Image (cartoon, rainbow, N blue to C red):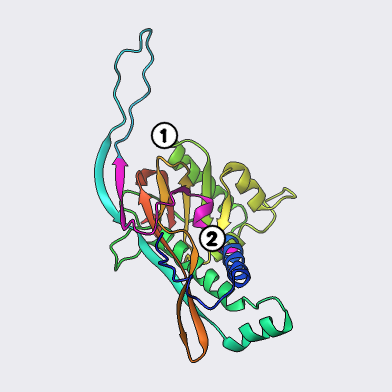
Amino acid sequence: MSDYLMRDGAPLTEAEWESIDSTVVAVAKEHLVGRRVLHIFGPLGPGIQSVPNERLAAPSPGAISFEGSEGAAIEVAGREQTPLLVVHKDFCLNWRTLETSRQMGLPLDTGAAAAAAAVTARAEDRLIFLGDQEAGVEGLLTAKGRRTLALSDWSECGSAFDNLVNAVAVLSGAGYTPPYAAVLSPDLFACLLRVYKDSDTLELTHAKEALTGGVYECPVLGQKQGVVLALGRQHFDLAVGQDLATAYLESRNLNHYLRVMETIALRIKDPGAICALTKGGK
């Protein structure tokens, strides 16, 4: 097996790598939002550079008969190759930090690794929800064929919950079944943290009853951005080549430089399962 992460020759002990790895994974899990609503396809391996993305035709109703006679099959309406992009952030492990840990028998300070993991997690979410124009990759909020619903004034009590329920109705009316989930910008999410009308519970609590797939805050979304999704791997998933890992880059000026990295691709198979909440509904 090739050591493409360049860890075999790195001047770090197994225990030091374990400390870095556990920090990176723990911090990434705290920050990642897209993976909470997407099925993971993979890991496929670091050498995979693209994956086929099959967009499915709208299914006809299921057949009912005595003998199982032939009915219309769900077929592929289009197929394209989606690139797995490298998402990464580098960090420096200071030589004095490392020597202090070794000489004093102290735990390794992995603050820089944690910061790199958090930045990488946000970059992943940015790719998932907003896409990457330079790479020609769509996100859930930018996909062609997505449904849209105009944002109401969420400063009014109850309007946030009503808007989310209306988005669910848009998806349900188009034939998409639960579970549904919402991912919201911080300003929109904050509007749910108040008591709903004459009840004694938060709007967020009521929203979670309607959207059983969860209601999540996502810092990479800009002001007044949100999306309601009909969950399911038949609608979209996240293809993973190399899952989140830390590679050794080089030693420079006695310090050690490492990279938190992954290779991923968002596959949107049915954009109709997406209802973007937008200003003016566009």
- Disc 2 packing (10 Å; few <14; some 14–19; many ≥20): some
For residue 54, side relative to residue 178 (left or right): left
Q: Which residues are magenta?
A: 30-55
The count of marks equals 2
In this rendering, the answer to whether 13 lies above or below 240 is below
Q: Is residue 36 magenta?
A: yes
For marks 2 and 1, give the CA distance: 29 Å
Foreground of the two, 67 or 1 = 1
- Mark 2 lies on residue: 32
Foreground of the two, 186 or 28 = 28
Location of residue 216 in the rendering, given as x and y in whole percent from the top left corner: 57, 56
Foreground of the two, 205 or 153 = 205
Mark closer to the observer (2, 1)? 2
Give the position of the N terminus as an image quadrant.
bottom left
Amino acid type of disc 2? Leu
For residue 224, side relative to residue 207 (left or right): left
Give the position of the C terminus as an image quadrant.
bottom left
- Mark 1 lies on residue: 175
Q: Looking at the image, which residue is at 38% across and 15% down?
A: 64
Q: Looking at the image, which residue is at 31% across and 12% down?
A: 69
For residue 85, side relative to residue 33 (left or right): left
Find residue 114 and report its image quarter: bottom right
Amino acid type of disc 1? Gly
